[in-house]
Image (cartoon, rainbow, N blue to C red):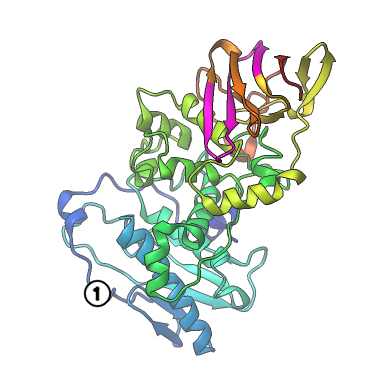
Amino acid sequence: MGSWTHLLVATALVATASRVAARPSVAAAAADPPAQYTANPRVGPGGARFKDSPHFRIYGATNDAVADGAIAMLEAAYTCFVEDLGWRSPGLSFRAFESTSPVYNKVNVYQLETLPGAAANAPTDLNLGLAWLNVVKTYMTEPSVVVHEFGHVLTYAAGPPGWIDQTRTGAWWETTANFVADTYLTSSRCARARNKYNQKEGNTLIDFKKSISDSFQVIVDGTRDTGNYYQAWPFFVYLFNNLDNTTANIFPQVWTKYRKGSDETPLHVLERIVAPIKVQAVVARYWARMAFVDIGHPKAQAAFNSQRRNLNYANLDSQGSGRYRVKSARRPRYMGANITPLKGTGDIVVNVTASMAFTASLAVKGANGVVRYVDMKGGSGQVSVANGEEAMLVVVNTPANLLLFDPFKLTAEANNGVDYQVQLTGATF
Protein backbone atom coordinates (compact mmCIF):
# COMPACT_ATOMS: atom_id res chain seq x y z
CA MET A 1 0.00 0.00 0.00
CA GLY A 2 1.21 3.49 -0.73
CA SER A 3 2.62 5.42 2.19
CA TRP A 4 2.68 9.20 2.45
CA THR A 5 6.38 8.99 1.61
CA HIS A 6 5.54 7.14 -1.59
CA LEU A 7 2.92 9.77 -2.38
CA LEU A 8 5.38 12.61 -1.94
CA VAL A 9 8.07 10.92 -4.00
CA ALA A 10 5.68 10.12 -6.80
CA THR A 11 4.22 13.61 -6.68
CA ALA A 12 7.64 15.23 -6.84
CA LEU A 13 8.34 13.40 -10.11
CA VAL A 14 5.30 14.99 -11.72
CA ALA A 15 5.10 18.62 -10.68
CA THR A 16 6.35 21.14 -8.20
CA ALA A 17 4.18 21.24 -5.10
CA SER A 18 1.82 24.18 -4.77
CA ARG A 19 -1.26 25.09 -2.79
CA VAL A 20 -4.75 24.01 -3.69
CA ALA A 21 -7.47 26.33 -4.87
CA ALA A 22 -10.07 28.12 -2.80
CA ARG A 23 -13.57 27.02 -1.79
CA PRO A 24 -15.73 25.82 -4.71
CA SER A 25 -18.43 27.95 -6.25
CA VAL A 26 -22.06 26.93 -5.93
CA ALA A 27 -22.21 26.44 -9.69
CA ALA A 28 -19.28 24.03 -9.70
CA ALA A 29 -20.65 22.07 -6.76
CA ALA A 30 -24.10 21.82 -8.38
CA ALA A 31 -22.97 20.65 -11.83
CA ASP A 32 -24.48 17.32 -12.89
CA PRO A 33 -21.79 14.75 -13.75
CA PRO A 34 -22.04 12.90 -17.06
CA ALA A 35 -22.83 9.19 -17.19
CA GLN A 36 -19.45 8.57 -18.85
CA TYR A 37 -16.38 10.49 -17.70
CA THR A 38 -13.78 11.75 -20.17
CA ALA A 39 -10.65 9.65 -20.69
CA ASN A 40 -7.47 11.61 -20.00
CA PRO A 41 -4.28 9.76 -21.00
CA ARG A 42 -2.17 12.68 -19.77
CA VAL A 43 -2.79 11.56 -16.18
CA GLY A 44 0.09 9.17 -15.63
CA PRO A 45 2.13 7.60 -18.41
CA GLY A 46 -0.83 6.64 -20.64
CA GLY A 47 -0.64 3.69 -23.00
CA ALA A 48 -2.20 1.92 -25.99
CA ARG A 49 -3.71 -1.04 -24.10
CA PHE A 50 -6.64 -0.18 -21.84
CA LYS A 51 -10.17 -1.06 -20.80
CA ASP A 52 -12.80 1.53 -19.94
CA SER A 53 -15.69 1.81 -17.52
CA PRO A 54 -17.83 4.88 -16.82
CA HIS A 55 -15.43 6.31 -14.21
CA PHE A 56 -12.15 4.42 -14.68
CA ARG A 57 -9.64 3.39 -17.34
CA ILE A 58 -7.49 0.34 -16.65
CA TYR A 59 -4.12 0.39 -18.43
CA GLY A 60 -1.85 -2.58 -19.02
CA ALA A 61 -4.13 -5.39 -17.85
CA THR A 62 -3.57 -8.28 -20.25
CA ASN A 63 -6.21 -10.44 -18.57
CA ASP A 64 -9.78 -9.31 -19.22
CA ALA A 65 -11.04 -11.05 -16.08
CA VAL A 66 -8.57 -9.09 -13.96
CA ALA A 67 -9.51 -5.82 -15.64
CA ASP A 68 -13.22 -6.56 -15.22
CA GLY A 69 -12.68 -7.49 -11.56
CA ALA A 70 -10.80 -4.26 -10.87
CA ILE A 71 -13.46 -2.23 -12.64
CA ALA A 72 -16.33 -3.82 -10.70
CA MET A 73 -14.53 -3.22 -7.40
CA LEU A 74 -13.64 0.40 -8.20
CA GLU A 75 -17.05 1.26 -9.63
CA ALA A 76 -18.59 -0.14 -6.43
CA ALA A 77 -16.26 2.00 -4.33
CA TYR A 78 -17.04 5.04 -6.48
CA THR A 79 -20.77 4.40 -6.10
CA CYS A 80 -20.53 4.14 -2.33
CA PHE A 81 -18.35 7.13 -1.58
CA VAL A 82 -19.28 9.54 -4.36
CA GLU A 83 -22.88 8.72 -5.24
CA ASP A 84 -24.19 7.41 -1.92
CA LEU A 85 -22.07 9.28 0.63
CA GLY A 86 -21.61 12.45 -1.41
CA TRP A 87 -17.82 12.76 -1.41
CA ARG A 88 -16.34 14.94 -4.15
CA SER A 89 -15.73 13.03 -7.35
CA PRO A 90 -12.09 12.00 -7.94
CA GLY A 91 -12.71 12.77 -11.59
CA LEU A 92 -12.72 16.49 -10.77
CA SER A 93 -9.46 18.38 -10.66
CA PHE A 94 -8.55 19.92 -7.33
CA ARG A 95 -7.42 22.87 -9.50
CA ALA A 96 -10.97 23.47 -10.73
CA PHE A 97 -12.98 24.30 -7.61
CA GLU A 98 -14.16 27.57 -9.13
CA SER A 99 -15.03 26.15 -12.55
CA THR A 100 -18.61 26.67 -13.70
CA SER A 101 -18.24 23.87 -16.27
CA PRO A 102 -15.98 21.25 -14.66
CA VAL A 103 -14.52 18.39 -16.67
CA TYR A 104 -15.06 14.93 -15.20
CA ASN A 105 -12.01 12.77 -15.91
CA LYS A 106 -11.77 9.01 -15.65
CA VAL A 107 -9.41 7.82 -12.92
CA ASN A 108 -6.52 6.01 -14.57
CA VAL A 109 -5.32 2.72 -13.08
CA TYR A 110 -2.00 1.26 -14.24
CA GLN A 111 -1.22 -2.42 -13.80
CA LEU A 112 2.50 -2.86 -13.12
CA GLU A 113 4.75 -5.88 -12.88
CA THR A 114 6.52 -4.50 -9.79
CA LEU A 115 6.50 -1.37 -7.67
CA PRO A 116 9.49 -0.94 -5.32
CA GLY A 117 8.45 -0.93 -1.68
CA ALA A 118 4.70 -1.13 -2.22
CA ALA A 119 1.83 -3.16 -3.64
CA ALA A 120 0.30 0.03 -5.01
CA ASN A 121 0.47 3.80 -4.74
CA ALA A 122 -1.44 6.91 -5.77
CA PRO A 123 0.70 9.59 -7.44
CA THR A 124 -0.78 12.89 -8.56
CA ASP A 125 -0.18 15.45 -11.26
CA LEU A 126 -0.22 18.71 -9.34
CA ASN A 127 -0.61 20.80 -12.50
CA LEU A 128 -3.67 18.91 -13.68
CA GLY A 129 -4.92 18.38 -10.13
CA LEU A 130 -5.64 14.71 -10.81
CA ALA A 131 -4.36 11.51 -9.21
CA TRP A 132 -4.01 7.99 -10.57
CA LEU A 133 -3.35 4.47 -9.27
CA ASN A 134 -0.34 2.24 -9.81
CA VAL A 135 -1.07 -1.35 -8.80
CA VAL A 136 1.12 -4.46 -8.93
CA LYS A 137 -0.73 -7.01 -11.06
CA THR A 138 -1.11 -9.60 -8.30
CA TYR A 139 -3.11 -7.07 -6.23
CA MET A 140 -5.39 -5.71 -8.96
CA THR A 141 -8.56 -7.19 -7.45
CA GLU A 142 -7.58 -6.93 -3.77
CA PRO A 143 -9.78 -4.24 -2.16
CA SER A 144 -7.59 -3.83 0.94
CA VAL A 145 -4.93 -2.57 -1.49
CA VAL A 146 -6.80 -0.99 -4.40
CA VAL A 147 -9.64 0.66 -2.48
CA HIS A 148 -7.06 1.85 0.06
CA GLU A 149 -5.26 3.66 -2.77
CA PHE A 150 -8.59 4.91 -4.10
CA GLY A 151 -8.98 6.48 -0.65
CA HIS A 152 -5.87 8.53 -1.40
CA VAL A 153 -7.37 9.64 -4.72
CA LEU A 154 -10.55 10.70 -2.90
CA THR A 155 -8.43 12.63 -0.39
CA TYR A 156 -6.63 14.50 -3.17
CA ALA A 157 -9.95 15.43 -4.75
CA ALA A 158 -11.71 16.32 -1.53
CA GLY A 159 -10.64 19.87 -0.71
CA PRO A 160 -10.84 22.75 -0.58
CA PRO A 161 -8.33 23.52 0.72
CA GLY A 162 -7.60 19.96 1.75
CA TRP A 163 -4.50 18.29 3.13
CA ILE A 164 -2.32 18.45 0.01
CA ASP A 165 1.24 19.70 0.53
CA GLN A 166 0.87 19.79 4.32
CA THR A 167 3.38 18.03 6.56
CA ARG A 168 1.31 17.45 9.69
CA THR A 169 -1.51 15.71 7.83
CA GLY A 170 0.90 13.22 6.22
CA ALA A 171 0.40 10.14 8.37
CA TRP A 172 -3.36 10.76 8.49
CA TRP A 173 -3.59 9.97 4.76
CA GLU A 174 -2.96 6.30 5.59
CA THR A 175 -5.46 6.40 8.46
CA THR A 176 -8.06 7.76 6.04
CA ALA A 177 -7.23 5.32 3.25
CA ASN A 178 -7.66 2.31 5.53
CA PHE A 179 -10.92 3.80 6.80
CA VAL A 180 -12.08 3.95 3.17
CA ALA A 181 -10.99 0.37 2.49
CA ASP A 182 -12.60 -1.04 5.63
CA THR A 183 -15.81 0.93 5.12
CA TYR A 184 -16.05 -0.38 1.57
CA LEU A 185 -15.47 -3.95 2.74
CA THR A 186 -17.71 -4.06 5.80
CA SER A 187 -20.11 -1.15 6.19
CA SER A 188 -23.83 -1.36 5.54
CA ARG A 189 -23.42 2.14 4.10
CA CYS A 190 -21.66 0.51 1.11
CA ALA A 191 -23.96 -2.52 0.86
CA ARG A 192 -26.05 -1.13 -2.00
CA ALA A 193 -22.93 -0.31 -3.99
CA ARG A 194 -21.36 -3.71 -3.37
CA ASN A 195 -24.55 -5.47 -4.37
CA LYS A 196 -24.88 -3.40 -7.54
CA TYR A 197 -21.50 -4.70 -8.76
CA ASN A 198 -21.71 -8.19 -7.22
CA GLN A 199 -18.97 -7.49 -4.71
CA LYS A 200 -18.86 -9.60 -1.57
CA GLU A 201 -18.85 -8.13 1.89
CA GLY A 202 -15.35 -8.55 3.33
CA ASN A 203 -13.61 -8.91 6.64
CA THR A 204 -12.62 -5.96 8.77
CA LEU A 205 -9.04 -4.68 8.63
CA ILE A 206 -8.96 -3.85 12.35
CA ASP A 207 -5.73 -4.62 14.22
CA PHE A 208 -6.38 -4.79 17.96
CA LYS A 209 -2.72 -5.26 18.79
CA LYS A 210 -2.34 -1.62 17.78
CA SER A 211 -5.75 -0.09 18.45
CA ILE A 212 -6.10 -1.62 21.95
CA SER A 213 -2.91 -3.35 23.10
CA ASP A 214 -0.89 -0.29 22.05
CA SER A 215 -3.60 2.29 22.66
CA PHE A 216 -1.11 4.23 24.81
CA GLN A 217 0.64 5.48 21.66
CA VAL A 218 0.03 8.94 20.20
CA ILE A 219 -3.40 8.78 18.55
CA VAL A 220 -1.80 8.77 15.08
CA ASP A 221 1.85 7.75 15.29
CA GLY A 222 3.93 7.58 12.11
CA THR A 223 7.05 6.13 13.73
CA ARG A 224 8.69 3.68 11.36
CA ASP A 225 8.08 0.00 12.24
CA THR A 226 6.28 0.74 15.55
CA GLY A 227 3.70 3.38 14.63
CA ASN A 228 -0.07 2.99 14.28
CA TYR A 229 -0.99 5.28 11.42
CA TYR A 230 -2.30 2.45 9.22
CA GLN A 231 -4.26 1.01 12.17
CA ALA A 232 -5.71 4.18 13.75
CA TRP A 233 -8.70 4.34 11.39
CA PRO A 234 -11.33 3.18 13.98
CA PHE A 235 -11.16 6.78 15.25
CA PHE A 236 -12.63 7.84 11.90
CA VAL A 237 -15.28 5.10 12.16
CA TYR A 238 -16.39 6.60 15.47
CA LEU A 239 -16.48 10.12 14.02
CA PHE A 240 -18.19 8.95 10.80
CA ASN A 241 -20.94 7.09 12.67
CA ASN A 242 -21.51 10.16 14.89
CA LEU A 243 -22.73 8.02 17.76
CA ASP A 244 -22.60 10.89 20.26
CA ASN A 245 -24.08 13.55 17.94
CA THR A 246 -20.89 15.60 17.72
CA THR A 247 -19.48 15.00 14.24
CA ALA A 248 -22.17 15.00 11.56
CA ASN A 249 -20.56 15.07 8.09
CA ILE A 250 -17.01 14.56 9.37
CA PHE A 251 -16.30 13.79 5.72
CA PRO A 252 -15.79 16.09 3.86
CA GLN A 253 -15.49 18.65 6.68
CA VAL A 254 -12.14 17.28 7.86
CA TRP A 255 -10.81 18.54 4.49
CA THR A 256 -13.05 21.48 3.64
CA LYS A 257 -12.57 23.15 7.03
CA TYR A 258 -8.81 22.77 6.93
CA ARG A 259 -7.17 26.20 7.08
CA LYS A 260 -5.32 26.74 3.83
CA GLY A 261 -1.56 26.53 4.19
CA SER A 262 -1.79 26.30 8.00
CA ASP A 263 -0.01 22.92 8.33
CA GLU A 264 -2.34 22.20 11.23
CA THR A 265 -3.33 18.71 12.31
CA PRO A 266 -6.71 17.07 11.59
CA LEU A 267 -7.42 17.37 15.33
CA HIS A 268 -7.35 21.16 14.92
CA VAL A 269 -9.96 20.82 12.17
CA LEU A 270 -12.01 18.54 14.41
CA GLU A 271 -11.83 21.19 17.13
CA ARG A 272 -13.71 23.59 14.84
CA ILE A 273 -16.18 20.94 13.69
CA VAL A 274 -17.29 19.93 17.20
CA ALA A 275 -17.21 23.37 18.85
CA PRO A 276 -18.34 24.29 21.46
CA ILE A 277 -17.66 20.69 22.54
CA LYS A 278 -13.99 20.20 23.31
CA VAL A 279 -12.11 17.90 20.96
CA GLN A 280 -10.47 16.37 24.05
CA ALA A 281 -13.90 15.20 25.19
CA VAL A 282 -14.59 13.64 21.79
CA VAL A 283 -11.28 11.77 21.81
CA ALA A 284 -11.89 10.62 25.40
CA ARG A 285 -15.30 9.24 24.52
CA TYR A 286 -13.86 7.48 21.48
CA TRP A 287 -11.40 5.64 23.70
CA ALA A 288 -14.14 4.84 26.22
CA ARG A 289 -16.17 3.29 23.40
CA MET A 290 -13.13 1.33 22.24
CA ALA A 291 -13.12 -0.44 25.61
CA PHE A 292 -15.75 -2.79 24.14
CA VAL A 293 -15.45 -1.59 20.51
CA ASP A 294 -18.83 0.10 20.77
CA ILE A 295 -18.23 2.27 17.68
CA GLY A 296 -21.03 1.17 15.35
CA HIS A 297 -18.93 -1.47 13.58
CA PRO A 298 -20.49 -4.92 14.13
CA LYS A 299 -17.69 -6.84 12.42
CA ALA A 300 -15.00 -5.10 14.46
CA GLN A 301 -16.93 -5.75 17.65
CA ALA A 302 -17.33 -9.43 16.78
CA ALA A 303 -13.60 -9.65 16.06
CA PHE A 304 -12.88 -8.01 19.41
CA ASN A 305 -15.06 -10.51 21.26
CA SER A 306 -13.14 -13.40 19.70
CA GLN A 307 -9.66 -11.88 20.13
CA ARG A 308 -9.80 -9.96 23.39
CA ARG A 309 -8.28 -12.74 25.50
CA ASN A 310 -5.06 -12.31 23.54
CA LEU A 311 -4.79 -8.53 23.95
CA ASN A 312 -2.35 -6.77 26.25
CA TYR A 313 -4.05 -4.92 29.13
CA ALA A 314 -1.02 -4.93 31.43
CA ASN A 315 -1.07 -1.19 32.06
CA LEU A 316 -0.77 -1.03 35.85
CA ASP A 317 1.57 -2.18 38.63
CA SER A 318 0.15 -2.86 42.08
CA GLN A 319 1.37 -0.63 44.91
CA GLY A 320 -0.63 -2.50 47.55
CA SER A 321 -3.86 -1.67 49.42
CA GLY A 322 -5.84 -1.13 46.22
CA ARG A 323 -3.34 1.35 44.81
CA TYR A 324 -1.91 1.04 41.31
CA ARG A 325 0.50 3.03 39.15
CA VAL A 326 0.75 3.02 35.37
CA LYS A 327 3.79 1.24 33.93
CA SER A 328 6.29 3.79 32.63
CA ALA A 329 6.41 2.23 29.15
CA ARG A 330 2.61 2.32 28.83
CA ARG A 331 1.86 5.84 30.00
CA PRO A 332 -0.73 7.33 27.60
CA ARG A 333 0.93 9.68 25.14
CA TYR A 334 -0.69 12.56 23.25
CA MET A 335 -4.40 11.70 22.85
CA GLY A 336 -3.58 8.05 23.55
CA ALA A 337 -5.18 5.94 26.26
CA ASN A 338 -5.00 3.03 28.65
CA ILE A 339 -7.94 0.62 28.71
CA THR A 340 -7.84 -1.54 31.83
CA PRO A 341 -10.33 -4.27 32.79
CA LEU A 342 -11.52 -4.24 36.40
CA LYS A 343 -12.42 -7.34 38.41
CA GLY A 344 -15.32 -7.11 40.82
CA THR A 345 -19.04 -6.58 41.21
CA GLY A 346 -21.14 -4.35 43.40
CA ASP A 347 -20.17 -0.77 44.15
CA ILE A 348 -16.80 0.15 42.66
CA VAL A 349 -15.11 3.44 43.54
CA VAL A 350 -12.19 4.69 41.42
CA ASN A 351 -9.91 7.68 41.98
CA VAL A 352 -7.25 8.61 39.42
CA THR A 353 -4.59 11.24 40.12
CA ALA A 354 -1.80 12.63 37.92
CA SER A 355 0.30 15.76 37.51
CA MET A 356 -0.71 16.10 33.82
CA ALA A 357 -4.09 16.72 32.25
CA PHE A 358 -6.14 13.58 31.60
CA THR A 359 -9.70 12.38 31.19
CA ALA A 360 -10.93 9.24 32.95
CA SER A 361 -14.13 7.28 32.51
CA LEU A 362 -15.66 3.91 33.25
CA ALA A 363 -17.23 1.71 30.59
CA VAL A 364 -19.61 -0.96 31.88
CA LYS A 365 -20.96 -3.64 29.57
CA GLY A 366 -24.26 -5.15 30.62
CA ALA A 367 -25.28 -8.77 30.26
CA ASN A 368 -27.39 -7.66 27.27
CA GLY A 369 -24.32 -6.23 25.51
CA VAL A 370 -25.30 -2.60 26.03
CA VAL A 371 -22.46 -0.39 27.28
CA ARG A 372 -22.94 2.54 29.64
CA TYR A 373 -20.36 5.21 30.33
CA VAL A 374 -19.53 7.06 33.53
CA ASP A 375 -17.51 10.28 33.25
CA MET A 376 -15.09 10.65 36.16
CA LYS A 377 -14.98 14.36 36.94
CA GLY A 378 -11.67 15.28 38.46
CA GLY A 379 -10.60 11.66 38.07
CA SER A 380 -13.11 10.31 40.58
CA GLY A 381 -16.12 8.12 39.94
CA GLN A 382 -18.14 5.17 41.06
CA VAL A 383 -20.39 2.63 39.46
CA SER A 384 -22.48 -0.35 40.49
CA VAL A 385 -21.56 -3.49 38.56
CA ALA A 386 -24.11 -6.31 38.62
CA ASN A 387 -23.43 -10.00 38.15
CA GLY A 388 -22.90 -10.67 34.46
CA GLU A 389 -21.58 -7.15 33.86
CA GLU A 390 -17.98 -6.07 33.39
CA ALA A 391 -16.21 -2.75 33.80
CA MET A 392 -13.17 -1.12 32.26
CA LEU A 393 -11.25 1.94 33.35
CA VAL A 394 -10.19 4.26 30.54
CA VAL A 395 -7.55 6.97 31.09
CA VAL A 396 -6.76 9.33 28.21
CA ASN A 397 -3.99 11.91 27.75
CA THR A 398 -6.01 15.07 26.99
CA PRO A 399 -3.86 18.21 27.30
CA ALA A 400 -5.64 21.54 27.56
CA ASN A 401 -4.16 22.73 24.26
CA LEU A 402 -3.74 20.80 21.04
CA LEU A 403 -0.22 20.14 19.76
CA LEU A 404 0.99 21.05 16.30
CA PHE A 405 2.73 17.71 15.85
CA ASP A 406 4.08 15.77 12.89
CA PRO A 407 3.34 12.06 13.42
CA PHE A 408 6.45 11.17 11.41
CA LYS A 409 8.66 13.29 13.70
CA LEU A 410 7.16 12.98 17.16
CA THR A 411 8.53 15.41 19.72
CA ALA A 412 9.29 14.67 23.35
CA GLU A 413 6.15 16.63 24.23
CA ALA A 414 3.94 14.37 22.08
CA ASN A 415 5.57 11.25 23.54
CA ASN A 416 5.35 12.47 27.13
CA GLY A 417 2.96 10.03 28.78
CA VAL A 418 0.63 10.66 31.71
CA ASP A 419 2.13 9.22 34.92
CA TYR A 420 -1.03 8.46 36.88
CA GLN A 421 -2.03 6.49 39.97
CA VAL A 422 -5.28 4.69 40.71
CA GLN A 423 -7.02 3.97 44.00
CA LEU A 424 -9.59 1.18 43.67
CA THR A 425 -12.28 0.22 46.15
CA GLY A 426 -14.52 -2.76 45.49
CA ALA A 427 -12.48 -4.00 42.56
CA THR A 428 -9.02 -5.13 41.52
CA PHE A 429 -7.06 -5.06 38.31
Residue 411 picture location, percent across and down: 65, 29
Q: Quadrant of residue 382?
A: top right
In the image, which residues are magenta? 347-374
Q: Main secondary structure of the magenta part?
A: strand
Residue kind at label 1, given as amino acid type: Ala
Quarter of the image with the C terminus is top right
Q: Is residue 427 left or right of residue 183?
A: right
In the rendered image, residue 403 lying in the magenta stretch gets the answer no
The residue located at (59%, 39%) in the rendering is: 220
Q: Residue at x 42, y 73 (%)?
A: 108
Residue 367's place in the image compared with 192, above or below, is: above
Q: Residue shown at 40%/75% (left/top)?
A: 197
- State the residue in front, 42 or 73: 73
- Residue 73 shows in the view: yes
Q: Is residue 316 left or right of residue 89?
A: right
- When the figure is inspected, residue 102 is found, relative to residue 313, above or below; the finding is below
The percent coordinates of residue 210 (x first, y second) are: 68, 44
